[in-house]
Image (cartoon, rainbow, N blue to C red):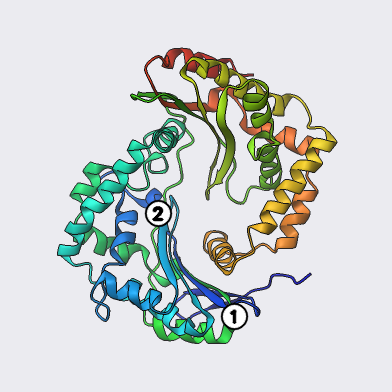
Amino acid sequence: MTAITWEVATLSNGLRVVTTPVSTAQSVSVNVFVGVGSRAEDRRTNGVSHYLEHMLFKGTERRPTAIDIAEAIEGAGGVLNAYTTKELTCYWNQAPFDRLDLAVDVLADMIAHATLSEEEIERERTVVQAEIQRAHDQPAAWASELLAKACFGDQPIGWPIAGSLETVGSLTRQDMVDHVRAWYTPPNMVVSVAGAAAHDEVVRLAERLFGDLPARPAPAVPPASAELPRERVIVETRDVAQANLGIAVRALARQDPDRYALMIMNTVLGRGMSSRLFKEVREKRGLAYSVGSGVARYVDTGVLSISAGVSPDKLEEATTVILQELARLADEPVGEAELQKAKDYTIGSFRLGLETTMALAQRAGEALLMTGEIEPVDDVVERLREVTPDDVRRVAGRIVRPEALSMAVVGPPGADPERLETLLASAA
């Protein structure tokens, strides 16, 4: 077995560069991570990180149009894109290994020399608003947005990443310029490259293309408020046939020592067709077509969330069953056979998720940006293997508390928020 290795260098201006070599690859994946997302925004500028992400593709001094930027990478046979989360923004492309210099140059050009023309900002404004409307028109996606609000309340981590139609409608070019100046600074960025690329070559390119960026410190992101919102159940009525529900509880921060046990616990609960939720909610009772759980970890907090699509007349029953399964994790130790299956699933999917140069570059870049270190794959596997039934039960006991549960439903008329809140409060 060949171990996954990487090298890290820090330029004089504070920019970190990490390279994960894959000598047999035919590609290089180039990623630029910036440590800013929707958590860093205020109410008026909610959505600016995501809007700006769109705008960096719209033209630079050397590549004046979006077509020029796209054709530079696609003309080499590559692909390019970006995404924004609550805590970071990532710009990436993937190109043949012999076009590494072009791949790095295009991203550096976008980040350092975007023109942010007023005309393009106005044109893209309706595109971003259409993206927001599309999420609203998808009941399951909108239930997820409402669940974040129910879980975190009226604070940045509970707001939509893309903002609202109103906030996007009022953002200005100056807002974007200020955002870049505050957050797009070398100490708050990581360049991560994986594939058939030599570390020294990547560092030389980064020095040439990013080395002139001034080394300003980025602001601090305020921590999430620990106070739970008053409105913990949000119901939105739609003319649809299915009730889309989400249940969430605040969980663990990114570096919490119990994160490995939480990963195993989440697998037991709701990952895959062997999970408890799938077997109990769908297979045994036929309450839902889709049901599952997931974990998100942030710098200072986290979320364990469950989603399902159920018949409206089965909403309360499905909610009750889901809550019972959550409570059972805290009340009863997981059997050794079930625990071993969950470990095998978690470890196997973790390994399989690292098969591409893109996945390797993403993992290394995000970890270095958000934690300052990259945990070796074998160390993660070892920590997962060490998880015991008592660990799972203890972690479930830490986070599964009735007073901390929240819920969102998007579906046809009939869902009673007060009744659902009573169900949450009675979970034990």
Q: Which residue is mark 1?
A: 196
Q: How many marks?
A: 2
Question: Could you say where residue 331 lies in the image, as x and y percent from the top left?
Answer: 73, 24
Q: Quadrant of the C terminus?
A: top right
Picture residue at 38% right of the left edge, 78% below the top: 75
- For the point 57% across and 59% down, which residue is it? 371
Residue 230, image x and y in percent?
41, 24
Which residue is located at x 74 percent, y 70 percent?
3
Tell me if I can see residue 364 in this picture.
Answer: yes
Q: Is residue 325 above or below residue 379?
A: above
| Residue for badge 2 | 37
* Three-letter code, disc 2: Gly
SS for dot 2: loop
Q: Amino acid at mark 1?
A: Ala
In the displayed structure, does residue 339 sit left or right of residue 326?
right
Instruction: Give whichever of discs 2 and 1 has the lower sequence position.
Output: 2
Label 1 sits on a secondary structure element that is loop
Choose between 28 and 404: the one closer to the eye. 28
Q: Residue at left 72%, top 56%?
A: 380
Q: Nearer the viewer, mark 2 or mark 1?
A: 1
Q: Is residue 259 above or below residue 362?
A: above
Q: CA distance from mark 2 to mark 1?
A: 30 Å
